Image (cartoon, grey):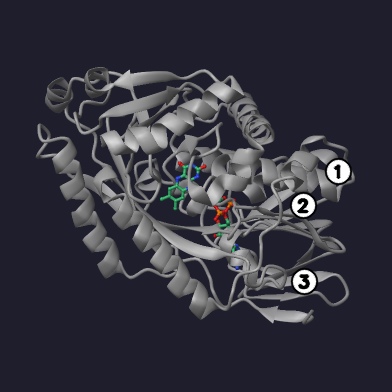
Amino acid sequence: MTKTLKIGRLPQNDLTNAWDTILPPRQANRPLGGNTRADWLVVGAGYAGLAAARRLAHNRPDEQVIVVEAGQCGENASGRNSGFAIDLPHTTSSNLDELSSAHRYMGLARAAIAELDSLIRQHEITCDWSKDGKYHAAVTEEGTRTMLQPFAKELEALKEPFRWVEREELAAKLGTSHFQKAVYTPGCVLMNPAALIRGLAESLPENVTLYENSPITQISYANGITVETIDGSVAAPRIVLAANGFSDQFGFAENKFVHLALAASLTRPLTLEEQRDYGVEKPWGLTPANGFGGITMRYTNDHRLLIRQDIRVAMGQKFSPLKTAKIAQQHKRLFDARFPTLPAVTMENSWIGYICMSRNGAPMFGPVAPNIWMATCQNGIGVTKGTIGGLLAADMACGRDNPLIADLQNLGTPSTLPPRALVEVGARATIGWEVWKNRREA
Ligand SMILES: Cc1cc2nc3c(=O)[nH]c(=O)nc-3n(C[C@H](O)[C@H](O)[C@H](O)COP(=O)(O)OP(=O)(O)OC[C@H]3O[C@@H](n4cnc5c(N)ncnc54)[C@H](O)[C@@H]3O)c2cc1C
């Protein structure tokens, strides 16, 4: 492996994430400056990096952990998601491996939810964390037959609690008659993801130092590990790479990740009059029967509605403001079609976030070289998988026995992809086909 690598692809910090902009302003931690040393270095302060840092600090209370984050906590991918901490496997074709080991998968997801739940209580993190469950919904008869019924069968086989919700009840619960049927499962937790990630960053143990707004532009593996930012450097004997899709530049995950851009919009809060017209009292979360063709939606505690729609291949992890503006218009159209009684409701903000997926749905987890661990590639379900991946990577790194490590390893390792040009064409074609095939589920 090359000893020194330049890191050219850096996260864009465009401050468009509504989950973050609706919160009170936050003073980010100071950027890295000067040359410093630590016992452990963690790259990235998303769910994975923060969980890894917290666990390293807990396992080794006398050692110093440094986390270097390119952007600001809350504004990064972990703060930009739809805010579902999901306890069950998704029923998309990309996750077939996970489905085959569903019990192990659920154990991992639930351990992550329990960890977050305990931290939220312990540190009094205000993030609207609420076990509301979720509706997995289909728009068409065909969607119900081909996607929801197999999902329900699987839940039966797993002995997991669920309930069918028919059109009328669904319309009353969601305030839209757009959906034909849903399978309701009670274990999913909803939250404001930016508030959660801010709270996790602000409650790190004393032996963790977090630097924000500090993109790493170079890493060297000669005589230990040294990372450099524009104003400083950190040297450490050991590192956990938790920069998700950006981690493939650090030398160990080349040709493993497909990078995708996901778009979301959050409305302003409904006025009291609009809330009366809308007629729904309880917050809810909905995932579409088909993850490519359908739309994820939420109604939040503070009376906002979320639309998460549009998924694109973005191997360069860059998206133009023009495209975001087009997506914002598209989301408003989708919103109006679903909620015709709320025509005056505007979007607070629309934003793009990046996820990475592997060809076989496996995470990139564990040791990749002496003193180097990875906790990346959450395949779009990073609240739980990122949290548990970071925590378990730290346990592995400290030689701490944890039976969940084997369960996570059992999800496999990412298979190698063809050259980038082929991946782009192939992934675009696959997603385009999935979206077209499931267009009636939108
Ligand atoms: C719109 C959208 C909706 C989603 N909805 C859900 C959902 O409801 N539930 C769910 O579970 N998941 C969801 N996801 C996926 C989830 O957000 C991600 O899987 C999760 O954030 C991954 O966490 P992570 O810690 O691995 O990586 P990230 O959150 O991506 O964190 C990695 C960090 O590394 C930093 N970094 C990168 N490069 C460098 C560098 N050179 N130097 C320093 N730092 C660097 C980044 O700034 C970033 O903060 C969604 C994603 C999007 C975009």
Name the residue at 64% across, 55% down: 376
What amino acid is at disc 2? Val
Say what secondary structure mark 3 lies in: strand
Q: Report which residue position mark 1 lands on.
A: 60
Q: Residue 207: give its label.
A: none
Discs 2, 1 touching: Cβ within 8 Å: yes
| Alpha carbons under labels 3 and 1: distance apart | 21 Å
What amino acid is at disc 1? Arg
- Image height of 222 relative to 259, above or below: below
- Image height of 390 relative to 8, above or below: above
Q: Residue 226: give its label.
A: 3
Instruction: From the top left corner, tell me how far across and down residue 352 is, in percent.
Output: 38, 58
Quarter of the figure with residue 413: bottom right
Mark 1 burial class by Cα count in 10 Å: few <14, some 14-19, many 20+: some
Name the residue at 51% across, 72% down: 423
Discs 3, 1 touching: Cβ within 8 Å: no
Say what secondary structure mark 1 lies in: loop
Name the residue at 76% across, 41% down: 55
Name the residue at 56% across, 26% down: 124
Q: Report which residue position mark 2 lands on.
A: 65
Q: Which of marks 3 and 1 is nearer the N terminus?
A: 1
What amino acid is at disc 3? Thr
Discs 3, 2 touching: Cβ within 8 Å: no
Instruction: From the top left corner, tell me how far across and down residue 358 is, in percent.
Output: 59, 59
